[in-house]
Image (cartoon, rainbow, N blue to C red):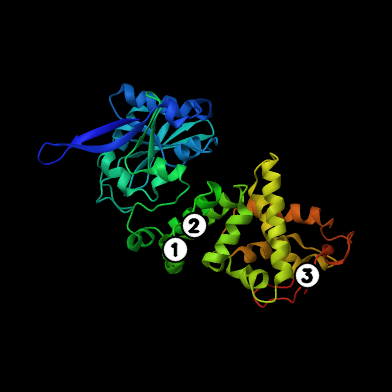
Amino acid sequence: MLIRYTTDKKGRPQKQAEVYQAKEHNINRSYIDKDAITVIEKLNRRGFQAYIVGGAVRDLMSKREPKDFDIVTDALPEDVKKIFRNSRIIGRRFKLVHIYFGAKIFEVATFRSLESTNNHNDYGGIEEDVLRRDFSINALYYSPSENQVIDYIGGVKDLRNKRLRSIIDLDTTFHEDPVRIIRGIKYSNISKLKIPFKLRMQMKKDVHLLNDVSISRLTEEVFKILLSGKSMIIMNDFIKYGLFSYLFPEINDPIIGKNRKEFKKQFFRDLDKLDKKLYRGVEKSKALALSYLLDAYLTGLGTFSTKNIVMKDFVHNIKTSLKPLIAPNVDVESAARILLKRKNIKINGKRRYSKNGGRPSFNKFKKIRKLDK
């Protein structure tokens, strides 16, 4: 392992970062998207620093093939835009660049300073950028050209010791971005990381801050979890940490509330089925995920015991069940069809299945309209 040094105010050498070579990080380069490497190499040729950062590096070091590749650089957004014709700048206050390769999008961000916030541009160096990240396991920088992982904050040791550690002070981090609570629980389950006691307690204490997060961000995170192949264990932790009621207030009490043991069991059985399907390589689909998320709940309402299903009302029922989350109409409609097919129901046709689809049922709840008025 190499050590990167800087100098302090008195000119004395000071350790800055640990640099892991190929034999030490054991990253499989075949897992790295070639277009991501093309972006970085092109920035390097223009004299700019550029690295793969965050979750992609974490996954690569854990022997998993990343789904997305985020890139950071010291080039300003305007510089990146000039280099890549297939790009556009997004964001008004904090600007990012999206570079397009067909259906693929690579997000390129400029190093942030310690004064930077989500509300304005304030750029800095890599040494500051690392301190703006959420957890140490997401603060690793990979250079494809040198085949090195640069670690300023001890993230490699935390990853190998299976520990989730917040870089930002616990009193501050979730106030800055409450979504870090969701992500922390997700990371701990996907990468099998232990959450230290103080971090766990802070998550539970600050969970109410999720009320201030935009619905679009919450929806995005929920779909990532449903399609992660680990939805059952992550949702179980959401209940333990008190997150579930903030994300799914409509289905929280009917499924998770007291005296609902059978439905809780069925809810987790459905998520387990979804995870296994994804593990077997079934095409990832938001519609499929929604169908398994809501199956037990809608069954309990007696939705599938009606003689006739009006598609328009059924779609509305699914949307109501998801509130406050908002799923795309096309996915909700597809989920409705998947559910009806699974229950062997024809739209506006006769039932061809056993009553209640073989599931137990519970009374109708006030917030959900009965379909067969």
The disc, 1 or 2, on the residue closer to the chain's N-terminal end is 2
Where is mark 1, residue-wise? 203
Amino acid marked by disc 1: Met
**Which is closer to the viewer, label 3 or label 1?**
1
Q: Residues within 10 Å of mark 1 (few under 14, many from 20)?
A: many
Using the image, tell me which numbered label, if any, was put on residue 302: 3
Dots 2 and 3: beta carbons under 8 Å? no
Image vertical order of residue 116 relative to residue 352, above or below: above
The disc, 3 or 1, on the residue closer to the chain's N-terminal end is 1
Q: Is residue 258 visible?
A: yes
Q: Position of residue 112 (x, y in %)?
A: 29, 44
Q: Residues within 10 Å of mark 3 (few under 14, many from 20)?
A: many
How far apart, in angstroms, are the residues tagged by discs 3 and 1?
36 Å
Residue located 32% across and 37% down the image: 77
Q: Position of residue 174 (x, y in %)?
A: 39, 60
Q: Is residue 313 visible?
A: no
Relative to 110, is 358 on the left or the right? right
Q: Residues within 10 Å of mark 2 (few under 14, many from 20)?
A: many
Nearest the eye: 143 or 306: 143
How far apart, in angstroms, are the residues tagged by discs 1 and 2?
9 Å
Using the image, tell me which numbered label, if any, was put on residue 182: 2
